[in-house]
Image: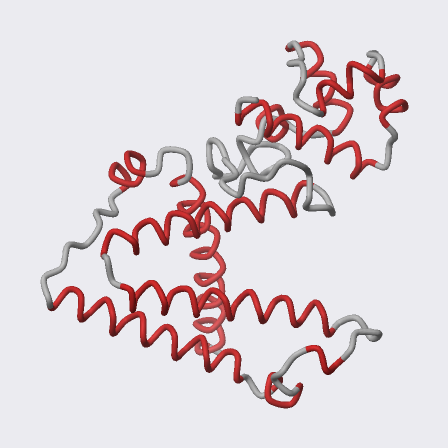
Amino acid sequence: MKEENAEFSRTLSLLRQEKGASQRTAAADLGISQALLSHYENGIREPGLAFVVKACDYYGVSADFLLGRTLSRDGTTISPEELYDISDEKSNSVKGGVLALLSKKLLVNSVGVLFGLLGKTGSREAIQAAAGYLSTAVYTVYRRLYDANPSSNPDFFSVPPRHFQAGLAEADMKCCEAELADALAAHVKAKGPMPEMTNDALARDYPVLYQSILQVVHNTGERVTAISGGRKRQERK
């Protein structure tokens, strides 16, 4: 199955689940048989343009969104042309709608680019520091999710709740960030080769992934700029 076909099939299936419609109901509403819709959702057959238009109207999304070419349902925001999933996912293991799936893909693809670039430096210290930083970020989000459930066992984690709440995980990330900076500085001082990171180089070396990291850079930049803008407004008062 081609990647673009797999993306369409996954999104089509997730939109139906998000709408709360059974395959039989959605198929009837779309004017096709349940068997044909099942083929579309499983990537066995490719639909024609008429069906794509009907599906867009039915689910209230743009064709670009249905085809996985944008993160915006109306297709108006800056977004990657195509989001390829490098996790070799064979089924829709991410539940909760299209946003969860596409957000996961953005981060998975971006991490793939990051470790590809780090691998080109050949610095084991830099790779280990980056892995530690990202692992702690994942740990933090997972723990917040786990702790939000009142029935969760508080003894599941080895780090005591009071230490976690005090910010030890964030301190670990800061240490990893410092180790990463030191490792890269040592690599440059030793005149080790650094990977080229222009848009053209990223497009050449990571043709199906680089749009994801550009999207992450754009989204994060907007959030950070908003924080900075708020701080400046407070200073003027």
Determine whether, in the image, residue 180 is placed left or right of residue 162.
left
| Rendering quarter of residue 13 | top right
Q: Which of 213 and 122 is in front in this view?
A: 122
Relative image position of residue 166 (x, y in whole percent): 58, 88
Count of marks, rendered view: 0
| Rendering quarter of residue 209 | top left
Q: In which quarter of the image is the N terminus?
A: top right
Examine the rendered structure and indicate whether residue 124 appears above or below residue 171: above
Tell me which residue sits at (78%, 19%) in the image. 37
Relative image position of residue 71 (x, y in whole percent): 57, 39
Q: Which of 66 and 229 is in front in this view?
A: 66
Determine whether, in the image, residue 192 is placed left or right of residue 98.
left
| Rendering quarter of residue 90 | top right
Q: Nearer the viewer, residue 191 or 16?
A: 191
Relative image position of residue 147 (x, y in whole percent): 73, 74
Determine whether, in the image, residue 212 is placed left or right of residue 59.
left
Examine the rendered structure and indicate whether residue 65 appears above or below residue 195: above
Relative image position of residue 236 (x, y in whole percent): 44, 76
Determine whether, in the image, residue 218 is placed left or right of residue 150.
left
Tell me which residue sits at (50%, 51%) in the image. 107
Examine the rendered structure and indicate whether residue 154 appears above or below residue 11: below
Tell me which residue sits at (37%, 53%) in the image. 114
Examine the rendered structure and indicate whether residue 21 appears above or below residue 146: above
Q: How is the image coloured?
A: secondary structure
